[in-house]
Image (tube, rainbow, N blue to C red):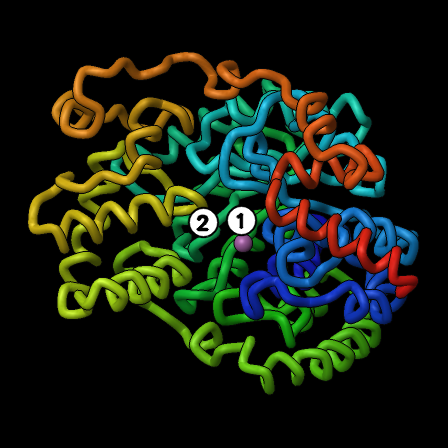
Amino acid sequence: MTKLKITETSLRDGHQSLIATRLTTDEILPVLSEMDKAGYYSMEVWGGATFDTCLRYLNEDPWERLRKIRAYIKNTKLQMLSRGQNILGYKNYPDDIVEKFHKNAIYEGIDIVRVFDALNDIRNLRKTIETVKAEGAHCQCAISYTTSPVHTKDYYLKLIKDFENAGADSICIKDMSGILLPFDAYELIKAIKKVTKLPLELHTHCTGGIGEMTMLTAVEAGIDIVDTAISPLSSGTSQPATESLCLALRGTERDPELNLNSLNDIADYFKDVMKKYEENGTLNVKVLMTDPKALIYQIPGGMLSNLLVQMKSLNALDKYQEVLEEVPRVRKDLGYPPLVTPLSQMVGAQAVFNVVSGKRYNIIPTEIRNYVRGMYGRPAAPISDEIKRLIIGNEEVITVRPADLLEDSYDRLKEEIGCLAQSEQDVLSYALFPQVAKSFFEKRTQNISLGSH
Ligand code: CO
């Protein structure tokens, strides 16, 4: 067996999981040269929620962040997380936007695009895979991992064959809720290794307290790459700590052989940065506490806290337990969608309505109707006729790829935003988050005319 490769996630999932993605570019830049010396296989630095957060809360241009990071990182591959047809947003975008967006990300320095679809519907990934490959970058296809009667080993093995046929360069098991049990991981990885020669990566979270155990069995099963975060941005709802894993494997044949002095310096730097987030309350101690309920209800930690907020606002906290038990039933009704954005929010909202209104599917959010209409893609298990009738009556369910119903929109959006957009990248920011991007552009124009920097 060869040495284990490490993807460092602190600059994307690490701060997304612990401090709501609030690291600023100014906080990131000073440590990059040291990170470039650590010997990581890759660094995940872009995509996921980082794009939205830059524009919405940090008054930063996410494209500029990427450009600046690339300027410092000369030896390490840069990686982003894409939601495929949803790009970095929460709905399907037309093909021209998907293509232009990924092209620009690669142009600005992304080497590896990790792409996933919330429903594991390969049709929602094809356009992204095709674009990434055409641009000469590495396309990693990720399984959105979940458990259900239909999410069997065979289901995942078939998905991997689909990924391979679609042109994937590597595969990731993306356990976004941290529910992949150590020995299930071992078996799954062994089985995957038998059907494909593509490199295999594991992404998990420590939420339920088993992240490190799962990572160790994965290493024993022959995983090629794992995702870890530098210690101050690790554990809790984030990934296992980079240094700890390196120390645990020291001297073994899987030793990642990272530069431990660099790791120490990087950790010292981030310890300092995290003080600010601890003091201003952004780092909530709850995200660092082990939450085994994530394993019992198979509900991601973030979704549990969302449910609590929702129940509180409805003055129905006494029904919390009932809602927790309703979630798996709604999931079953809807064909067992993995509980990942945006499906986790949708399933949670429906479960709350079912319990609080006293009658199941008495109140149905538009998103759930659209889901049943097939607008998000195909669920792993078919939705029963009874549930379909209850939610959309006699309406037809679409059978085409959802994005086939969308017309190319770049030219229209470019005209719509006018001279507020100064580049193709601005138009793409506008395509993803219209209001947020527009107000960012307006502030930028104002600053220029005031002569400030
Ligand atoms: Co994650």
* Circles 1, 2 touching at the beta carbon (< 8 Å): yes
Amino acid marked by disc 1: Ala
Q: Which image quadrant is residue 359 in?
A: top left
Left or right: 399 in relation to 127: left
Residue at 22 percent of width and 49 percent of height = 351
Please identify the quadrant where the C terminus is shown.
Answer: bottom right
| Residue 156 seen anywhere in this rendered image of the structure | yes
Left or right: 27 in relation to 344: right
Instruction: Kindly identify which residue carries mark 2.
Output: 185
Q: Nearer the viewer, residue 418 or 70?
A: 418
Q: Who comes first in sequence, dot 1 or dot 2?
A: 2
Disc 1 secondary structure class: helix
| Coordinates of residue 242 in the picture (x, y in percent) | 66, 67
Q: Nearer the viewer, residue 175 or 127?
A: 127
> CA–CA distance between discs 1 and 2?
8 Å
| Coordinates of residue 424 in the picture (x, y in percent) | 80, 33
Q: Nearer the viewer, residue 117 or 402?
A: 402
- Label for residue 90? none
Residue at 43 percent of width and 55 percent of height = 177
Instruction: Kindly identify which residue carries mark 1.
Output: 221
| Coordinates of residue 386 in the picture (x, y in percent) | 12, 25
| Residue 167 seen anywhere in this rendered image of the structure | no
Q: Please identify, in this view, whether the residue under mark 1 or under mark 2 is nearer the observer.
A: 2
